[in-house]
């Protein structure tokens, strides 16, 4: 194992618990940086980027509306969805403590919910707010909120789940993807858990979910060997109390923030102990940063497109909210070309990881996006540097370019914006090493 230098470990903290360093962030030590990222507290950047006012919920024309009205409703929903996605990207760039936004982004992928089916940017923003409130808190609180979240109910057919005719989508995904993992439940458990979730409904124009008593099955259910008149909340508690749940949750966070290789058994035991009976996400993250693998140069991760773009915006000091509407639209178009837009995961399984983001088509889109960001960056320190390649590396938090990358950058050092764009697409930046 090759242990990272302290500066490289600090960069990894910013990459894995945030979206990458801003200029000056690497001057702090590891412990100070970790304590800032995990400590919470006031965040002027995030506070100055409140959620957008989307206007009245779109799609209110109703089933009897003519084709033109429905078309207009659809266009307004898409416009609102783009405003919501653009706002979150801006908040990622603005946040002083990016850990909250990064963990909110993680939970968005974990409890993957897609606007393409929900068709309510209002409800997607409401779910986003809930995930942010619990991002570094107790997993119990987050899981309880998610099983009755309006966007989640629409996404996983909760409105169809009623007594006498239970719909199993939410109960299955909750156990398989959100809380336990494959192989730790039976089909009977899925069916019985679905009964516990009956009666919860959501509407696109409403602000929250509601439980309709006559649709709820109040009979005795048997889930994972436990019998009782289970409610949504008691079902969550029962599932999370299973011994398989804590290792599963810790493993999912490890997979996205540390390595695609599962943690060794002794590491996983330490992480589960830190997570504890309180299911404390912050304590789990702190324990992760103390593991040798977190400081191992071999545990690299390919940045997802949103993570890469948010990091680039932060490093180059570009705020999407300060750009004109056409440029903001181009940012989202670029992300769409790379295959990832906030609030639009492809399925309940979330987004891909690793080499899936390194296709030739995504590489072309990445370079165009990098050029767009660089065109709006203030780069005098790079322009006046004796070694421009090293200067842009310092701005991006890259300590050293490989010989191959430096040779490629040497061809564009005369154009500081093209240099910045090409550097942002180099392996040393696209991959969090």
Image: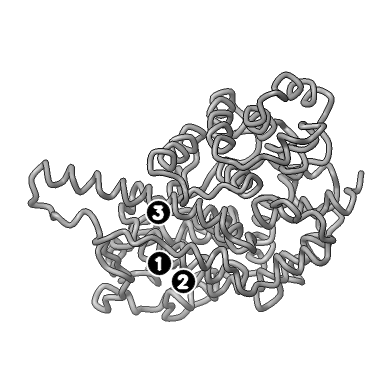
**Nearest to N terminus: mark 2 or mark 3:** 3
Q: Mark 2 highlights which residue?
A: 145
Image marks 2 and 1: residues in contact by CB distance under 8 Å: yes
Q: Quadrant of the C terminus?
A: top right
Residue 220, placed above or below residue 223: below
Which of marks 3 and 1 precedes in the sequence?
A: 3
Q: Is 114 placed above or below 231 here?
A: above
| Closer to us: 93 or 163 | 93
Residue at 49% from the left image edge and 72% from the top image edge: 144
The crowding category of the residue bearing disc 1, from other C-alpha atoms within 10 Å (few below 14, some 14 to 19, many at least 20), is: many
Evaluate whether residue 357 shows in this view: yes
Q: CA distance from mark 1 to mark 3?
A: 18 Å
- Residue 159 appears at what percent x and percent y? 29, 62
Q: Label 3 belongs to which residue?
A: 84
Residue 336 found in image quarter = top left
Image quadrant where residue 35 sits: bottom right
**Which residue extends farthest top?**
411
Query: Which circle, 2 or 3, is nearer the viewer?
Result: 3
Residue beneath the point at 73% across and 43% down? 395
């Amino acid at each position: 194992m090759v242990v990272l230098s302290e500066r490289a470990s600090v960069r990894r903290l910013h990459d894995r618990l945030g979206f990458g360093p801003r200029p000056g962030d690497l001057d702090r030590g590891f412990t100070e940086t970790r304590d800032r990222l995990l400590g919470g507290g006031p965040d002027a950047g995030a506070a100055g980027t409140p959620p957008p006012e989307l206007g009245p919920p779109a799609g209110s024309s109703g089933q009897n509306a003519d084709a033109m009205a429905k078309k207009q409703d659809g266009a307004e929903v898409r416009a609102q969805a783009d405003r919501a996605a653009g706002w979150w990207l801006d908040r990622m760039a603005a946040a002083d403590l990016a850990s909250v936004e990064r963990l909110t982004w993680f939970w968005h992928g974990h409890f993957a919910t897609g606007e393409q089916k929900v068709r309510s940017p209002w409800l997607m923003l409401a779910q986003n707010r809930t995930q942010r409130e619990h991002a570094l808190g107790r997993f119990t609180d987050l899981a309880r909120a998610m099983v009755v979240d309006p966007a989640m109910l629409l996404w996983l057919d909760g409105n169809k789940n009623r007594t006498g005719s239970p719909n199993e989508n939410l109960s299955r995904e909750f156990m398989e993807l959100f809380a336990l993992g494959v192989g730790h439940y039976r089909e009977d458990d899925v069916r019985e858990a679905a009964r516990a979730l009956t009666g919860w409904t959501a509407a696109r124009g409403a602000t929250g979910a509601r439980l309709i008593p006559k649709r709820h099955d109040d009979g005795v259910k048997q889930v994972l060997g436990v019998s009782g008149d289970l409610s949504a909340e008691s079902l969550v508690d029962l599932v999370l109390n299973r011994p398989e749940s804590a290792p599963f949750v810790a493993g999912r966070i490890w997979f996205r923030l540390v390595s695609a290789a599962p943690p060794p058994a002794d590491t996983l035991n330490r992480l589960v102990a830190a997570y504890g009976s309180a299911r404390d996400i912050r304590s789990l993250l702190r324990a992760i940063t103390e593991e040798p693998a977190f400081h191992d140069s071999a545990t690299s991760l390919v940045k997802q497109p949103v993570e890469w773009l948010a990091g680039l915006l932060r490093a180059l000091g570009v705020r999407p909210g300060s750009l004109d509407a056409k440029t903001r639209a181009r940012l989202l178009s670029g992300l769409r070309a790379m295959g990832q837009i906030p609030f639009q995961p492809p399925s309940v399984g979330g987004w891909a990881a690793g080499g899936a983001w390194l296709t030739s088509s995504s590489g072309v889109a990445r370079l165009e996006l990098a050029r767009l960001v660089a065109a709006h960056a203030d780069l005098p320190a790079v322009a006046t540097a004796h070694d421009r390649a090293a200067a842009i590396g310092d701005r991006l938090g890259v300590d050293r370019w490989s010989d191959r990358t430096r040779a490629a950058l040497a061809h564009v050092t005369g154009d500081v914006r093209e240099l910045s764009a090409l550097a942002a697409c180099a392996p040393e930046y696209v991959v969090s090493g």
